[in-house]
Amino acid sequence: MNAKIIGTGWQLPAYAADNDYLSTIMDTSDEWIAERTGIRKRYLAKKETTTSLATGAAQKALEASGLQPEQIDLLIVATITSDTETPSTACRVQAELGAVNAVAFDINAACSGFLYALHTADAFIKSGIYKNVLLIGAETLSKLVDWTDRSTCVLFGDGAGAAVLTATEKGGVTAQVTGCDGSRWEVLSCRGRSNHNPVCREESELGYLQMNGQEVFKFAVKTVPLCIEDVLKKADLSAEEVTWFLLHQANKRIIQSVAKRLRQPEEKFPMNIDQCANTSAASLPILLAQMNEQGKLHSGDRLILSGFGAGLTWGACVVEW
Ligand code: UT7
């Protein structure tokens, strides 16, 4: 059995901050951000939370799938910005949706989170343990970034995307590759709570996201084409046979470089980075759901989903639509 996507949904906060607005609160410009990244605006949560965005996207995906919340066996939220350290966002979304029969947990694999979640879901479906799975990528990264660091804060945005999967005999997710190089964790990280137990009493503030942008850039343009080639080999497909390459929306220049390395036309690499910026684990499912909504995905299409991020982590999968 494979996992087949039968419904998608997306949700963004109501408030959008464009590059011109950011240039009024820090030393940056629309020209710098747009030229270096392709980003024109990003959505920032005011009242929304990771849980509310995740729930909104999930409700739409469920509606599109035709399944009832009680039919979901497994609910995974990929996020690095859970509203609560515990319980997981997935537990809270389970309650919001009334998905009372679902086992629920979060996955923290940063921008590769949705692919890690998809791999996990596919394994549970293949083993016969679960049949219907709800996957959500949801982030409110605006609370994690350092708004005094112009080299990172302009890159990220908030949002959520969701997909409902069910067991299928043919098609669906036909090949997956995921990987991690934990030795390079410091390239992109966010410090957590420090110890303050009675025998340690280490006092320090919670940290913000820190990134060596150029290292992440080099890692991405090298690793993403390699893992796509890997997954194509696993699926016995050539790049030419792929209809769409949906890549994590981190930087337009990274996506263009991957297209070039794979010798594929840029038109096969849809982008929404200009509108949404980098929404980490939410980036792939938002793009997928928007393309689905726009009627761009047809039965028999072959999709590659691929992403990379903190960890360092990466992944790619082949989906037969
Ligand atoms: O999901 C994964 C998350 N991360 C990524 O994918 C990030 C990957 N990396 C990148 O996308 C790029 O490295 C960045 C967009 C982060 C940076 O682009 P870059 O072309 O590597 O720029 P840079 O870091 O080399 O900085 C060039 C200049 C510097 O000024 P000087 O030293 O040349 O005078 C920066 O201080 O640009 C300056 N700069 C800015 N200027 C205006 C950095 N941020 C800004 C800014 N506005 N927001």
Image (cartoon, grey):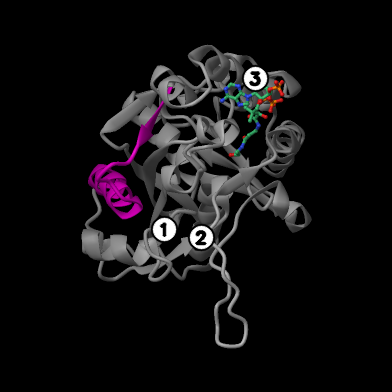
Amino acid at pointer 2: Ile
For label 3, the residue is 256
Residue at the image point whose x is 37% and y is 43% from the top: 160
- Kindly state the secondary structure of the residue where label 1 is placed: loop
Residue 141: x percent and y percent?
45, 45
The answer for how far apart the CA atoms under marks 3 and 1 are is 31 Å
The answer for how far apart the CA atoms under marks 1 and 2 are is 10 Å
Of residues 244 and 272, the one drawn nearer to the viewer in this rendering:
272
Report the side of 242 relative to 158 (left or right): right
For label 2, the residue is 107
Q: Is mark 1 within 8 Å of ligand 1?
A: no
Amino acid at pointer 3: Gln
For label 1, the residue is 82
Instruction: State which region is magenta.
Output: 41-65
Where is ligand 1, by quadrant?
top right
Residue 152: x percent and y percent?
57, 35
| Residue 265 shows in this picture | yes
- Kindly state the secondary structure of the residue where label 2 is placed: strand
- Can you say whether 220 is above or below 73 in the image? above
Instruction: Give neighbour class at mark 2: few <14, some 14-19, many 20+ (Cα, 10 Å).
Output: many
| Residue 240 shows in this picture | no
Q: Which callout, 3 or 2, points at the residue further toward the start of the chain?
A: 2
Which image quarter: residue 22? top left
**Whether label 1 touches label 2, CB < 8 Å:** no
Q: Which callout, 1 or 2, points at the residue further toward the start of the chain?
A: 1
